[in-house]
Image (cartoon, rainbow, N blue to C red):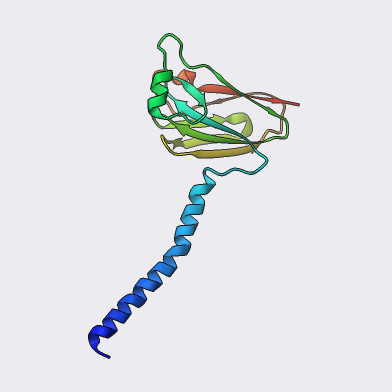
């Protein structure tokens, strides 16, 4: 066997080992990405989009869609989510403009590392208490930051 053939075989072996070692790493990275968007089967799922002028918008709204929703005379409405006591709640949070935060102190939820435009941040919790609970953006996101509030209403 010539030196050139041996080097070629070694290169192919190295390439094969790299691919075989890379597959589990790629699967792990893909599963971590999916975890951010997949929810438990029995959860009440709410998609919420944060917008610095509109507040919390129900659904997944892109930046250009949010521009058409904004009206200077009628700022964002306070969003209400309704669930029953004992429900597993999943919030799929995203942003349509800038980095936002999220907090619902009554359930111990504080996201301070940012809800980024185009990325989904998944929050799950059990609605174990009856009442009306406020959630808000906890990162100053613009002049209308005060509109970044909503309520979760948990009924018996």
Give x and y (percent) for residue 16: 38, 72
Outermost residue to the right: 156
At 48% from the left and 58% from the top, the residue drawn is: 27
Q: Nearer the viewer, residue 23 or 88?
A: 23
Q: Is residue 12 above or below residue 51?
A: below
Residue 125 visible: yes
Q: Is residue 77 above or below residue 58?
A: above
Give x and y (percent) for residue 87: 70, 35
Give x and y (percent) for residue 134: 59, 24
Q: How many marks?
A: 0
Quadrant that contains the C terminus: top right
Where is residue 143, by image quadrant? top left
At 33% from the left and 76% from the top, the residue drawn is: 12
At 44% from the left and 21% from the top, the residue drawn is: 145
The answer to whether residue 43 is left or right of residue 4 is right
Give x and y (percent) for residue 38: 56, 44
The answer to whether residue 134 is left or right of residue 69 is right
Quadrant that contains the N terminus: bottom left
At 48% from the left and 17% from the top, the residue drawn is: 76
Where is residue 155, by image quadrant? top right
């Amino acid at each position: 066997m010539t030196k050139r053939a041996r080097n070629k075989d070694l290169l192919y072996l190295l390439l094969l080992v790299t691919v075989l070692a890379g597959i589990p790493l790629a699967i792990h990275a893909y599963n971590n990405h999916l975890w951010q968007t997949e929810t438990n089967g029995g959860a009440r799922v709410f998609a919420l989009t944060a917008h610095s002028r509109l507040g919390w918008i129900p659904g997944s709204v892109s930046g250009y869609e949010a521009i058409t929703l904004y009206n200077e005379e009628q700022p964002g409405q306070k969003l209400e989510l309704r669930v029953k006591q004992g429900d597993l709640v999943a919030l799929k949070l995203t942003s349509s403009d800038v980095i936002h935060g999220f907090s619902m102190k009554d359930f111990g939820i504080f996201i301070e590392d940012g809800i980024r435009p185009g990325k989904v941040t998944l929050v799950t919790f059990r609605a174990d208490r009856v009442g009306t609970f406020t959630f808000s953006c906890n990162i100053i996101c613009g002049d209308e930051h005060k509109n970044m509030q909503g309520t979760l209403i948990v009924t018996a």
